[in-house]
Amino acid sequence: MSTSTPTRDELGLPIFKARHEISPGEISIGVIIGRTSEFFDFFVYGIASVLVFPALFFPFVDALTGTIYSFAIFALAFVARPFGSLFFMMIDRAYGRGTKLTIALFMLGGSTAAIAFLPSYDSAGNTAIWLLALFRLGQGFALGGTWDGLASLLALNAPEEKRGWYAMVPQLGAPFGLMVASALFAFMVASLPAEDFLDWGWRYPFFVAFAINVVALFARLRIVVTEEFEHLFQSRDLQAVSVASTIRDEWKTIVIGAFAPLASFALFHMVTVFPLSWVFLFTADTPISFLLIEAVAAAFGVVAVLASGYLADKFGRRTLLGSCAVGIAVFSGFAPMLLDGGMFGEILFMVLGFILLGLAFGQSSGVVATGFATEHRYTGSALTSDLAWLFGAGFAPLAALLLSANFGLLASGAYLFSGAIATLLALWLNRELASRK
């Protein structure tokens, strides 16, 4: 099916150009490209927060304290992200989605590349720490502007019986991004002496992240700014509106939407950033082996994300999210202890964790868009995503490491358990999720 859009020829007579119907598959391509580039940035910084930044920026304290300081700076991006959304929504309303994306992605890439040029504490003192914090804030602020609406468009444009399948597509970017980032760091660590790695080798993945951002920018712009997609965004009411009016009219949906995926977002860092810090600080295992374990476990995560789409369509998204929250609560009661069980325990923790994460995280973006009034879908979805990442994931590595270092590994499960309870409560409150999507 196609529609026709009238234009005028040189004599002023109408000419009708066929506009092809956008398929969910076309939208999926843009979503996967965008999300994979963002998560690659995310994991490059997360891995460096464990392997590099404590030694480079906090050499004046012990390794554990340096990692805690590093995780505190890690969290700044999640604090800055909602403010970035507020700013870039204004850019969107004034100059359009393409301008917003261009500024945001160049700012994200610029902040990421700038980190690669930072001096160490030994050469610049506290200035190096302040610059690291500044560029981390820049990353988070820019991420607030990378919301292109494609994920919401995908969820709304998917066939009724395939809503769960297409809702999981954006989440594939997370395991893909981790697989590439972990493999790249493992290669750099294995190929270089420790002194060279800490001097210049760690900087290379940040340059790669900048290059990927540029490629992703043009790939997304090629989709987002086309006439066909702009028409589809308008027909689905996916346009930026006032943040104040969105919060005033949709605050209940925003709050419930932010807490519904909390279990999966809390688990997100419990199987990515935190375990690397524990293994690196408290075991004799090499970071190379654990980075490779992460990459392999992420492959299990890809399969689980794909499975979440099938299960959500068969049993309902609410049922799947609730079941996963219960599973995560059970996982929190025993799994952290596996990290002290040698390589077999680490593999078991990571594989089980990524299977659970894939099933839950695979549907965490699909619960947002349909809950909003049409005029608030675009802005409301962006705000909900920002808050979910802030509350669920932003402080997870810091909280888990502090709890584990002071009270034992099992204590880190308390953070996971609280996320599972929050998800179950949000699912109970949100009647919108009670119907199958």
Image (tube, rainbow, N blue to C red):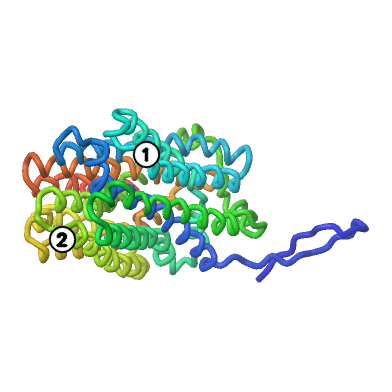
Of 54 and 124, the residue lying toward us: 124
**Could you tell whether 166 is left or right of 59 in the image?**
right
Q: Vertical placement of 21 versus 69: above or below?
A: below
Q: Specify the label residue 118 is tagged with.
A: 1
**Where does residue 164 sit, x and y in percent of width and height?**
39, 64
Between label 2 and label 1, give the one nearer the viewer: 1
* Residue annotated with mark 2: 349
Q: Residues within 10 Å of mark 1 (few under 14, many from 20)?
A: some
Residue 122 seen in the figure: yes
**In front of the other: 330 or 283:** 283
Task: Please report the residue visible at 19 percent of the width from the left and 60 percent of the height from the top.
Answer: 290
First reached walking from the N terminus: tag 2 or tag 1: 1
Q: Which amino acid is tagged 2?
A: Phe
Q: Residue furthest top?
A: 126
Q: Nearer the viewer, residue 337 or 320?
A: 337
Q: Residue at x 69, y 65 (%)?
A: 19
Q: How many marks?
A: 2
Q: Position of residue 161 (x, y in %)?
A: 44, 69
Query: Against 207, is 350 above or below?
Result: below
